[in-house]
Amino acid sequence: MRADTFAAERNVPFRRSAISTFLLCLMVGLPGPTSAQNILNNGGFETGLMCYGFWTWSITGIDFAGDYRFALSTDSHSGNYSLQIACIPGGTDCWRAAIYTEQIPAIPNQNYTVNVWVKCPTGGGGLFYVNSTAGSVASAWLACNATWTSNTMNFQIGSTATSFSVYVYNYGTQPMLIDDMVLTYGDGTAPARINLYQGTRSVGISGQNVLVDGAPYLALGFFDVPRSDISLVQATGANTVHGLGSSSGADCFNVGSESYLDAIYDAHMNFVPDSSAASKLDAPEVFPTIMQTFAPHLANIAWFLSDEPDLVEVPVFDYVPPATFVAEGDAARGATSLPLFADMQHAAWSVAADDAPYAPGIDFWMAEPYGPDFSSLEHATRLLTSISPRPIWLAEDLIDANLIVPKAYWAIVNGATGIFYFTWPIFEQSPGQLSAATQAFSELTTLKGAIFGSEMDALVTPPGGIATMSRFNQGAAYILAVNPNPQAVQGKFSVQGIAAGQQVSVMFENRTLTASGGGFTDSFAGVDRHVYYIASPNTALAASLTNKTGAVAARDWSVLVFNAGIGAADNAAIANLTFTRTGGTACTPKVAPGTFPLSVGSLVPDATATGNVTVNFTGCDSTSKFTVAVSLSANSGATAATITFANQRY
Amino acid sequence: MTILRWQRNVLAVAFLTASAGCLSADPILTLTPSPDLSGGPGSIVGWGFTIVNDTSDYLEFSSSQFCLNPVLLTPALSCTSPLTGVFHDIIVGNDPIIGPDSSLSEDFGPIGFTSGIGYFDIDPDAVPPSSDIGQIVLIYDGYDQDPNSGNATQLLFSVPLAADASVTVTPEAATVALVATALPILAMMGLLARRHRTACSPAFQP
């Protein structure tokens, strides 16, 4: 269990960071390899657009409405591929387009040199550009000579910049090929690539849960977390960082200090690498290399294959044809054991046919039911589950601070097991949103055991308008309840087997309710959540006769025992079976001495088990009628019940 | 089974099935004259019934209960007992067998409580206008032949059959005098019912 692992590690909180500090001290003094010194880990585009973003500008003013397309080309300066930015044949809207590195951690006042090889027709227009968090840094035109040409630019990062990004533009309508971009310090050196925690985590899928290190995983985190903010994100209670964004990648840069992924791991968090930009290139063949290069790190627990591949409305930036997407997934699976997932934008509002063709390409789902509307979240989870019941993680954004906590519960109640807020920089700038997200993470982490506890939804009926998730965990019952509507609701939660007078604690609100017969009553002022906790709840046993087979002298009766209460039925047993003849041919059924008590094991709420009782009906025929009393017991006799069935025949 | 009206009428089965908006091969229970009854503290109210058996099995009942909502019918009946009184079975004690494609209708017999599905003994201390809202749940078994024939094989085990029901406690108490007033009328109704009794299914056991 990941949480347990972390808990253990918190007892020695500095172990990971101590190791990393020690190893870094050893490595900093070592010279990097002289043959491939490069801060960039994908300068040659052999892994497509991993570690890069891309953008087009249109004469219409609408981004991505232009006619530029990005692709991999086998016309390369070295290696197998170069990156091509080209205007489509006959395209009239090709103003400019660019690729840009994700944010590279900066060393203040450091001199850098960037070199790139480009191939563009004479007269074509290309541009180098460096932008930092402290503003524009440098730019230079690229030479277009119809052959592969080296271009170099030197620049210095300012004293206040924390990161920077290198852009390569195509300003012309002619295609431009880009390859072998090398970024070094001004003296031509670059730190070696350091991964302290190389390896592959044990991650799998079980039903609708992601299992990390063998335990169900509740993913809570943010998109787009800069290296410098990892500790701040950790302080919110987040356990996972999503790689989609401009400020983080999967081990993209060699900067001398602790790598991004190592820092994530040292912060007791996990990471989800993102290949969205690469996914848009229609080049599934690079995905094995992507996985081999970027997946092996102990911080990585899943792979985000593509963002919004179903968004056909935005063809260049988002849309990936299903066949390409599935091919990418297949190629990736051949090179990593990490489960793959993708954000299906249509799931929140469209039909299953839009997303079903993508299902074979991934192992679990992400949806993005943004905004204050709760119904789109329910729509998304139902739709994706109808296509294929798998784990669902959600991206949540554009949401008011006061709705963040109830919507987080709404996600859980609707079956999601992951919540990522989009984006960290946005939340960081909004104290209200950040506080609410922190509260949501704290409460849901507290409830993690309950969320993955034994399901007992059938035993709890909420008032109209309220949705619940009812679980049993470690001897207690939990009911997570959400009112998704602004209308106030007051009503009774009917709970099977609950005793009058039972105390019901309302977690996180310091309230206690008292159950009446069959349930308890509470109110919701509007959109809100309540979490009910019932310690030592009652057990209620029920039974059913489900089969009778075999010879008259050794008739096998199947007795189904059902824990219909919200408490545990430990060591449940059929205590006795008695027969009272009420009609027909006279006879006396016999059960062998020593048969009872017949153990059926321990039953969590809403669980069943079957016990088989052999009865000797010698002398009876089918006209012989009996009233049969089935006596049940559990919890060392503290729980008992007798269920009577009249008019029973052998 | 003194006030018993057997009807083996395929047209009636089809009509009732269609009127229930369902064409599935599951029995249908209808409470008569109304599922929603009321009575004063200390009074007794009861339900008659129509059961339409559009299955190919012979049905026999093993239990009847009044359960408060929400009722958990499966995997085994979990029943919360009513609060304003106690439900008493009639139908299981009478042990009718309902053959395939048959229906059985029976009015509640307030005298002796010998016909109907069951009756509800409203607590003398029940406070108007309290009510119990739930379902009357029958558990039945199914056989390939009349189980009283001696050759039947049981095919269905402990299947629930339910209908919504409620009891509301009203201010006017049901008194013995009231029952006495109604007695001649009820006796007349019983006589009429006997005259209208129709032929029984082969499965019917008097």
Image: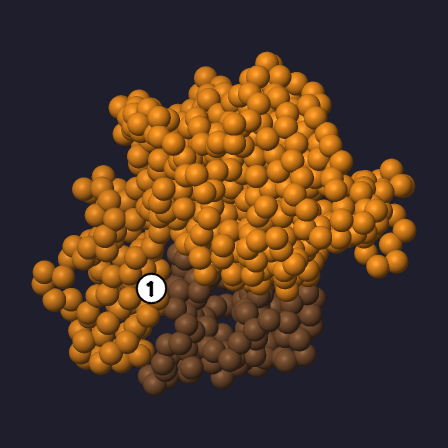
Give the vertical position of A312 relative to A650 (above or below).
above
| Camera-nearest residue between A282 and B8 | A282
| Camera-nearest residue between A173 and B12 | A173
Q: Quadrant of residue A325?
A: bottom right
Q: Position of residue A114 (x, y in %)?
A: 61, 34
> Which residue: 61% across, 21% down?
A157
Chain that is coloured orange in the picture: A
Which amino acid type is shown beneath numbered disc 1?
Leu
Secondary structure state at the residue bearing disc 1: strand
Q: Residue farthest to the left?
A: A593
- Chain letter for mark 1, please: A
Q: Position of residue A328 (x, y in %)?
A: 57, 59
Q: Which residue is mark 1?
A: A545
**Taking A626 as reference, is A533 left or right?**
right
> Which residue: 88% across, 48% down?
A93
Rendering colour (chain B)? brown
